[in-house]
Amino acid sequence: MTDLAAQSHVLSTLRGQRIETASWAYGNSGTRFKVFAQQGVPRDPYEKIADAATVHRFTGVAPTVALHIPWDKVADYPDLARHAADLGIALGTINANVFQDDDYKLGSVTNADPAVRRKAIGHLLECVDIMDATGSRDLKLWFSDGTNYPGQDDVRTRQDRLAAALRETYDRLGPDQRMLLEYKLFEPAFYMTDVPDWGTAYLHCTQLGERAQVVIDTGHHAPGTNIEFIVAMLLRAGRLGGFDFNSRFYADDDLMVGSADPFQLFRIMHEIVLAGALEQSAGIAYMLDQCHNIEPKIPAVIRSVMNVQEATAKALLVDHAALAAAQQAGDVLEANAALMDAYHTDVRPMLRELREDMGLDPDPIAAYKRSGYFEKIRDERAQGQAAGWGA
Ligand code: PSV
Ligand code: MN
Ligand code: MN
């Protein structure tokens, strides 16, 4: 490829990139110590969607928003979908919630009590009904289930209960719908989590069928985990359904993606680019799962989208021919340099150009600040609603 052809391939790929934002990122959130309320936060799902549409208006690559049930429960989902369409976006992944009910103290789908399991499965099935109404493709499942003490419950029996619940839910999916199973090392369970790692998620998915896929939340691993290796493994197995992007220093910090370790994000995107998995036909959902506790929310989501774009652009700039040649020759330093050269490239001018080409302002955050949107929502939305974590 000539330089010019390579550049235009990079730009057209970036233009086609899609990043889904999360409804809960727009509402109030905090830690278990304090929720700091912000001005202008959405009071209902309709207003969360308006904020997501605003992010899309300034970035051009965030045309869907994930919902969380029951945080985003409404009486009329087709109406909510119409509202999104009117604002230029669509409803995306449906996230189930079987972790905020007293009944789930000892687990939801893995609970020893069949009545609790039935209630939890009922919620998962209800989420599929909602997907039918919203036109969503993906059901994302994260279970807080686990135990705090050795001996508290039987590990294998809990896996059997989990498998049965997943089976019933999977069988309820329509032919174009998928189940994304998310894993998390620990928290809120501290001794044993029922879906703690990609291996467990992968095993369940392979037993279910092709439309069960693993989702990688970048904040859900032990410190030092090589996440790009997991990406490569799941890509190879055809089981990478998507990402929940965020950034962490310590545990599940849910900070802006690419803020703590932009190099890790680049390494992840490099595996994606190598596998040709950026194309939408690859079926990988690129989602943000973040909470903006102390920073203004809409600009933080815009910044996060831009961070993903920057990591992607750098990954697209890797000279694959030079990399493969160095690898083949066993030239460790040159192979590493092929990656580092791309990583150290300043891709911001290229992205500014791309945005101008797309009819957008080259500086989305400055454009958002100038737009008056914040002043408008601050005045219109007298009182905010917690994002769900505090609700
Ligand atoms: C809890 O850790 C969590 O952050 C999971 O990552 C889910 O994706 C998200 O909450 C929403 O349920
Ligand atoms: Mn997540
Ligand atoms: Mn999380």
Image (cartoon, rainbow, N blue to C red):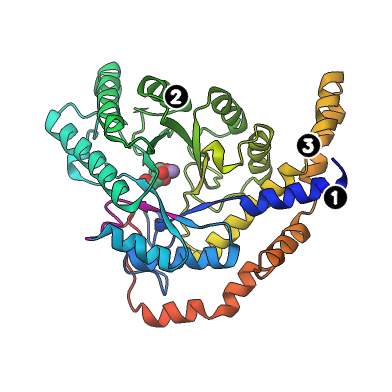
Query: In the structure shown, which secondary structural element does the residue marked by tag 1 occupy?
Result: helix
Q: Nearer the viewer, mark 1 or mark 2?
A: 1
Question: Can residue 386 be seen from the camera position used here?
Answer: no
Query: In the structure shown, which secondary structural element does the residue marked by tag 3 occupy?
Result: helix
Please state which amino acid type lies under the numbered disc 3: Leu
Please state which amino acid type lies under the numbered disc 1: Leu
- Name the disc covering residue 202, or none: 2
Residue at the far top: name it: 156
In the rendered view, would you say 344 is above or below 117? below
In the rendered view, would you say 129 is above or below 185? below
Residue at the far front: name it: 175
Please state which amino acid type lies under the numbered disc 2: Tyr
Which residue is identified by label 1?
4
The crowding category of the residue bearing disc 1, from other C-alpha atoms within 10 Å (few below 14, some 14 to 19, many at least 20), is: few
Sooner in the amino-acid sequence: mark 2 or mark 3: 2
- Name the disc covering residue 339, or none: 3
- Work out how far the residue at label 1 is from the one at label 2, CA to CA, in angstroms: 41 Å
For ligand 2, tell me if the residue under mark 1 lies within 8 Å.
no
- Work out how far the residue at label 2 is from the one at label 3, CA to CA, in angstroms: 29 Å
